[in-house]
Image (cartoon, rainbow, N blue to C red):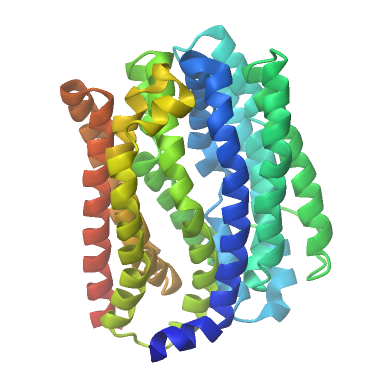
Amino acid sequence: MIFIQRLLKHKTFRNIGYLVVGNIVGRALALIGVFYIPKLLGPEQYGIYNTVTAYVMLFSVVTFQGLNKVIIREAVKDLKKAKHILEETIGLRYYFSITASLLCIIVVLFVDYEAGTKLYITIYSFSLLLTGFRSSMATIYQAYEKMKVLAGVAIVRPLFRVPLAIFFLTKGYGVISLIVLDLALDLLILLFVYYLSRKLVVFNIFSQIKLTRKYLIPGMRFSLLDFMITLSCRIDVLMLSFMTTPQNVGIYALAYRIVETGLLLRQPISQSVFPFYSKKFNNAKPKIIYLVKHSALISIPLLVLLIPVSIFIEPIVPAIFGDEFSSSAAIVSILIFYLIFYFALIPWGLFLEATKNEACLLYQSAICAVLNIVLNIIFYERYGLIGIAYSTLAVEFIRLIIAILFVKRTIRHL
């Protein structure tokens, strides 16, 4: 009880509260889209849209997004240096974001997709530029622990996207309307976030490209880590786009989107706790029970919530989305339990990142990436679409075990 009382009074907990509220409201609004958009598009067109977004997401690693955590980790040590750190790194983010967009367009020319899907990917590739720039701005709010703005963005985007998406789809504009709408909102949010960031720190957004080893090497590690995480837990839809029909992709994608709503707490927890861990573990040696408490505090209540969801989801999905999506229900009832492992991992992963042991997470994710690809192929051939859900459960459990082992080893050597 004393531990929980201290936790409730902590600034980090308040920041989690802001982001949780923002994400809950944002996800609730987005959930309306999840109910209507698949229904309006149908399994085939919904599968094409998810193929486009999954393919482009694969190239996000090239935007050098791992540099963000390096910026936060260094800036929280001395906020007076935030301006200098941003100007040392922002040019590099621009360069890699532009490169990612161009590479995405070039590679798709050689991929065996239909011409329409390739065109959609070419247009949507510009989201890599916008989200790359925006995420750089977001580091300012995380470093200063000003999470209200990020919470506001989490609400504003679906607040406009969902009704506009439904409007355009009912008018018959299809997948292209969703892609253009996403790009327009990303641009507007980028401008908004940049404008507000200047109240915290004013820096030159046109800084030259600088290759500073202090930021470059760990940034490359974090970026490679993000890529391995993508391969190990977010590549399922993309793999299915090569192995089966757009209709099956749509059926699995719907199940994934439903389960994904359960991630609404993960990002705010990670964003708020990372600066706190970076300060706390800068010189202190923690006891492993500290991380066990945090892990249990997150995962046990989640397990209690997910069991009834898994039991009663079967008739709900076809009732909401139609019989053509009925196969998605069985996938949801299995896939939903991967959230337990994914949330339980948070303290262990953040500890390794905060103590500059991201290389351990890189090894862990590399193992899980290879394992996920292999198990996806094996389980899909044996069990069909639901086999991808089995693969995800197995991989996330193994990821958690590996992270705990790495943390125990790291603590022994501190």
Q: Residue at x 28, y 36 (%)?
A: 389
Most foreground residue, 248 or 273: 248
Furthest-left residue in view?
382
Residue 350, percent from left and from top: 42, 67
Q: Residue at x 59, y 81 (%)?
A: 11
Q: Residue at x 73, y 62 (%)?
A: 87
**Image quarter (top left, top right, bottom left or bottom right) of the C terminus:** bottom left
Residue 60, percent from left and from top: 54, 40
Kindly indicate the quadrant of the structure image that contains residue 268.
Answer: bottom right
Residue 169, percent from left and from top: 67, 19
Residue 63, percent from left and from top: 58, 44
Q: Is residue 167 above or below residue 371?
A: above
**Image quarter (top left, top right, bottom left or bottom right) of the N terminus:** bottom left
Q: Is residue 118 left or right of residue 209?
A: left
Q: Is residue 317 left or right of residue 69?
A: left
Most foreground residue, 34 or 229: 34
Mark yes or no: residue 213 visible.
Answer: no
Q: Is residue 397 above or below residue 335?
A: below
Q: Is residue 302 above or below residue 377?
A: below
